[in-house]
Image: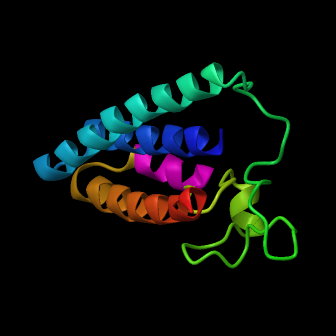
Amino acid sequence: RDMIVHHEQGVLLAHIVQGNGGNSTVAGLAYDIEYTQTAQIGQMTGFLSLWDYSLNSLDTPMAWMTDSSGHSDMTGMSAGSVDAAAAADGAIMPGMATNTQLAALKTLRGQASDILFLQLTIRHHQGGIPMNA
């Protein structure tokens, strides 16, 4: 479920830059991310359905990630932790962009949009690595 949420933001980032960016290579990358991750969301949703799991959860995002003592561990991850300020601004998982960053990406055009998209996308995907471990 958490990876679905994570992918949804990746799709959103890619969708925004396709309309605002200026570089065709970045637009091509964004297209690939948007459609690949959309397909993966469908696959993950299908697995949850086949396994009779709810698509929704009342658990705190990433609650399943625990440290060696069994405590939920959203801090100290190599790809970056979610600090209180980022969490309060909508970044509920490692690597996810904040609401402020998403708003900024929506306002930028051309090269500035491409640069912020790439910065956010790199961090976004680095943040997803611990979810696959």
Image vertical order of residue 84 relative to residue 34, above or below: below
Can you tell which quarter of the image residue 63 is in? bottom right
* 9 with respect to 114 (left or right): right
Please give the name of the residue rendered at 53% of the width and 32% of the height, measured from the top-left corner. 44
Which residue occupies the foreground of this view, 56 or 44? 44
The residue lying toward the viewer, choosing from 15 and 64, is: 64
Q: Count the numbered circles shown.
A: 0
Q: Main SS of the magenta segment?
A: helix
Where does the N terminus fall, quadrant-wise?
top right
Give the residue drawn at x 42%, y 45%: 13
Asked if the stretch drawn in magenta spans residue 104, the answer is: yes
Q: Does 23 sit above or below residue 53?
A: below
Residue 116 occupies which quadrant of the picture? Answer: bottom left
Q: Residue 11 location, x and y as percent?
A: 42, 38
Image point 69% across, 26% down: which residue? Answer: 55
Tell me which residue sits at (84%, 43%) in the image: 59
Query: Is residue 36 magenta-colored?
Result: no
Q: Nearer the viewer, residue 2 or 27?
A: 2
Which stretch did the figure color magenta? 98-106
The location of residue 67, given as percent across then percent down, is: 78, 73
Side of 105 relative to 58 (left or right): left
Tell me how the rendering is colored: rainbow
Which image quarter holds the C terminus? bottom right
